[in-house]
Image (cartoon, rainbow, N blue to C red):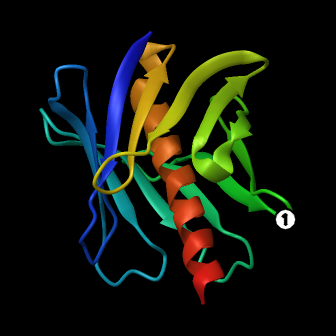
Amino acid sequence: MKNYYMKQKVFSFRDRYKVYDQEQNVVYHCEGKLFSLARKMKFIETSTDTLLFNFRRKVLSFLAKYYLSDPDGKEVAVIKRQFSILKPKVEIESSLGNISLEGDYFAHNFTLFEDGVELANVQKKWISWGDSYVITIQDEARASYLLAIIILIDSIFHENKNQNRH
């Protein structure tokens, strides 16, 4: 089990995230393409500047649908927003196993499970500049994969929040 800290850049024309370890070193970062209809992003291991995953949104979709692929373009996971009236629902289909989401993810506090086993827990920090989260990953071998999925879930929530304002 290991804790990570994720922070979304506040003033930026594109999506930007940084993921820190317990010593406050940036271990991963994610940058979106400027002016991308598909909201393309790259998830990068910072120390080696290695591309780990690509993200893209399905362009003409009523509800948000994101694709997570490896550097070779092979699809690893699909994260879809489901229709729901009271609170948002997200479905995650993955070649590495299907993941379910439980908790108050409307307020950005949720847990990811695979076959009833906890994979990660996400807690929003309320007193911070911009969106900041404490993320506990149970399986360190899958940390980059789970962190990438958590960033996509956050993108879906922000997209929903922006649509509700208009």
Mark 1 crowd level (few <14, some 14–19, many ≥20, 10 Å Cα):
few
Check disc 1 and report its element: helix, strand or loop. Answer: loop
- Quarter holding residue 70: top left
- Residue at point 46%, 33% (across, down): 145
Q: Nearer the viewer, residue 85 or 70?
A: 85
Vertical placement of residue 160 versus 163, above or below = above
Q: Nearer the viewer, residue 87 or 153?
A: 87
Residue receiving disc 1: 83
Where residue 80 sits in the image (x, y, percent)? 70, 57
Where residue 12 sits in the image (x, y, percent)? 24, 72
Locate residue 114 relative to residue 154 in the image: left or right.
Answer: right
Which quarter of the rendering shows the N terminus? Answer: top left
Locate residue 65 relative to residue 27 in the image: left or right.
Answer: right
Which quarter of the rendering shows the C terminus? Answer: bottom right
Residue sitting at the far front: 127
Where residue 96 sits in the image (x, y, percent)? 63, 29
Tell me if residue 78 can be seen: no
Vertical placement of residue 8 versus 150, above or below = below
